[in-house]
Amino acid sequence: MAKVDHSVPLEYSTEENDLKIFGFWVFLGAEIMLFGTLFAAYFTLVDRTGSGPTGAEMFEITPVLAETFILLTSSFTIGLAVHAMRLGSKKATLSFMGVTLALGLAFLGYEIFEFVHYVHIGAGITVSAFTSSLLTTLGTHGLHVTVGFFWGLFIMIQIAKRGINSATANKAFIFSLYWHFLDVVWIFIFSFIYLKGMM
């Protein structure tokens, strides 16, 4: 049985937990490279619209602001979930994680609506290099949110069954890092794709 260090937060309380968190930071480094590559491709192809619409013709501020508000709020609620977990409150941890995942679903709903709208106005993935790179970048982020939703749901089930212990706390904390990462990526998407594209 792993020796538990009670002087640190539960998610860091064993050597194995420390290594898992470190390993996840390494994984996030690879994810940064993935999204960095997608952004580089987008910025290279942003003016290659061919006969298709431009960003200024496609983007609408209201749904983008709604998506941003929803995702940033979910970042706050996952932070509250981690705080509740550190206080040992299983009910509050599950509640805040549930709210986080509900907000994630709301975000995905907006994104699906947005994709349908783009296709409807003639901005499908094969229309131009611009739409191809745009929809690939947005779709990759949306896929990550979808994976995060099911991952978070699985962790909630584990916490509900096993309670808050060093193993479930470690999993929940790593999930929170992932969710915050997705929010940071979205801030870049919002700032450098949407806002810049509307100008």
Image (cartoon, rainbow, N blue to C red):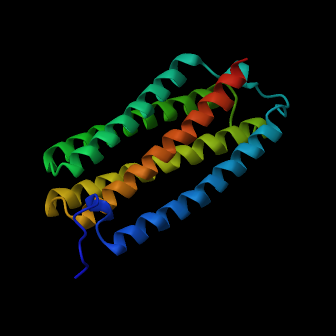
Q: Nearer the viewer, residue 74 or 83?
A: 83
Q: Is residue 195 above or below residue 168?
A: above
* x and y percentages locating residue 197 in the rendered image: 71, 24
Is 89 positioned to the left or the right of 46 in the image? Answer: left
Q: Nearer the viewer, residue 71 or 128?
A: 71
* x and y percentages locating residue 66 in the rendered image: 46, 23
Residue at 42% across, 64% down = 21
Residue 9, by quadrant, is: bottom left
Q: Split into 4 quadrants, where in the image is the N terminus?
A: bottom left
Residue 77, by quadrant, is: top left
Q: Is residue 14 above or below residue 64?
A: below
Residue at 69% across, 31% down = 123
Task: State the residue lying farthest toward the bottom.
Answer: 1
* x and y percentages locating residue 105 in the rendered image: 38, 38
* x and y percentages locating residue 111 in the rendered image: 51, 34
Is 106 positioned to the left or the right of 38 in the image? Answer: left
Q: Is residue 44 visible?
A: yes
Residue at 72% across, 41% down = 132
